[in-house]
Amino acid sequence: MKNGLYSAGIIGTGSYVPEKIITNEDLEKIVETSSEWIVTRTGIRERRIAGENEATSNLSTIAALRALDDADMDPKDLDMILVATVTPDMPFPSTACIVQSNIGAVNAAASDIEAACSGFLYALNVAQQFIATGFYKNILVIGGECLSRITNYKDRGTCILFGDGAGAAVVSRVEDGYGFLAQYMGADGSNGNSLAVKAGGSRMPASAATLLHDYHYIHMDGGEVFKFAVKIMSSAAEKAMDIAGITKDDIDCVVPHQANIRIINNVAKRLGVSEDKVYSNLDRYGNLSAASIPVALDEAVKSGRISKGDNVCMVGFGGGLTWASNIIKWSKDSNAIKKAI
Ligand code: UT7
């Protein structure tokens, strides 16, 4: 405990992506594009698509159970479940309540959080506050998306980018000196129109006209979002490092939002962090919005790219517009666990 606050950290991670793969070559058959263009301009080679009977809660439930298993925690010990998503199963009940029921977390409060692609980091940062004050002991944070459901497969500017998946993390008390060293969040609602789903809410309820105009799909000014992303991701990561009192040289692994490999490489360059310290799985999954960071985090941990004592920087941006970052001194000895197995 420091200054009357508990140290909070991540004690388990899990992820799940659906089985069905859509390759760039598959997309060549439905829109005017080429695999070469997609790989060069985005770094994406394939993405996963949820099956007919799968919704965000299904993907999130599997990721959640894997994270709980990794944390060696009974669902009944959870105090709260937060799901970050822009593709909930339905407006309400929340996807978090559906997951709560699926996993039998009968003692947990449950709610969704929406900050588009920054959503998982927003939810993680909210969870950290509850743990630090001692109000709650164990919180399950999930980023889950079925972006295929709001993607227009006639629009080559967006359909090549997005996929489906879910990632989860269990946030709990950790030993002092470890866990969250810094967190930072921001928003600029004045530029929200550059990345939006216009219909389906109270402003423009779903109707024949909204369907006709494709207003229930993602609309994006790609160039604007690209410029914003490079600038805000690097400044948000720097801000978190300042708050933590560390420099780029102290960072062991950056887990960025996976939107475009050119954005990720530009951010690494601006930060002065070598590309091998930056985790990317964009080639396999595309952009998973709120699920992108937790899926990448889980893979980075499980593949040994993150181990105890490492300073991990997560940073993201998204619709809203929003951005968020944090620095976590990793508290779990994943290598020791692997050796024991
Ligand atoms: O989580 C946040 C969500 N969004 C993002 O992170 C997206 C950020 N933006 C991007 O990743 C990039 O802006 C895109 C990948 C969306 C687009 O790449 P770009 O290098 O900015 O391309 P552009 O939009 O400037 O378009 C260049 C050309 C255009 O043709 P003309 O006008 O030069 O003849 C486009 O029509 O490429 C064309 N184009 C395509 N060509 C083949 C756009 N999409 C495609 C495509 N295949 N899929």
Image (cartoon, grey):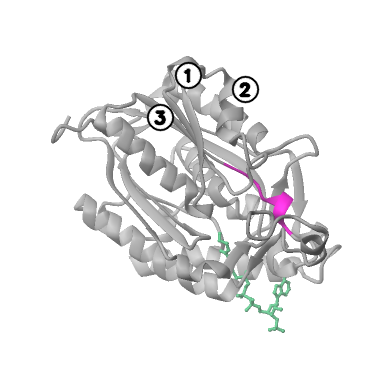
For label 1, count other residues whose C-alpha is less than 10 Å away and answer few (under 14), some (14-19) or many (20+).
Answer: few
Where is ligand 1, by quadrant?
bottom right
Tell me the residue that label 3 is attached to: 334
Tell me the residue that label 2 is attached to: 102
User: Mark number for residue 341?
Assistant: 1
Q: Position of residue 125 (x, y in %)?
A: 36, 43
Range covered by the magenta-colored residues? 144-151
Between 278 and 105, the one nearer to me in the picture: 105
Tell me which numbered mark, 1 or 2, is placed earlier along the sequence.
Answer: 2
For label 2, count other residues whose C-alpha is less than 10 Å away and answer few (under 14), some (14-19) or many (20+).
Answer: some
Q: Along the horizontal axis of the image, is 110 left or right of 98? A: left
Can residue 160 be spotted in the picture? no
For label 3, count other residues whose C-alpha is less than 10 Å away and answer few (under 14), some (14-19) or many (20+).
Answer: many
In front: mark 2 or mark 3? Answer: 2
Where disc 2 sits, the SS reads helix
Q: Amino acid at mark 2?
A: Asn
Taking the spot 54% from the left edge, 38% from the top edge, the residue there is: 167
Q: CA distance from mark 1 to mark 2?
A: 29 Å
Q: Position of residue 277 (x, y in %)?
A: 40, 53
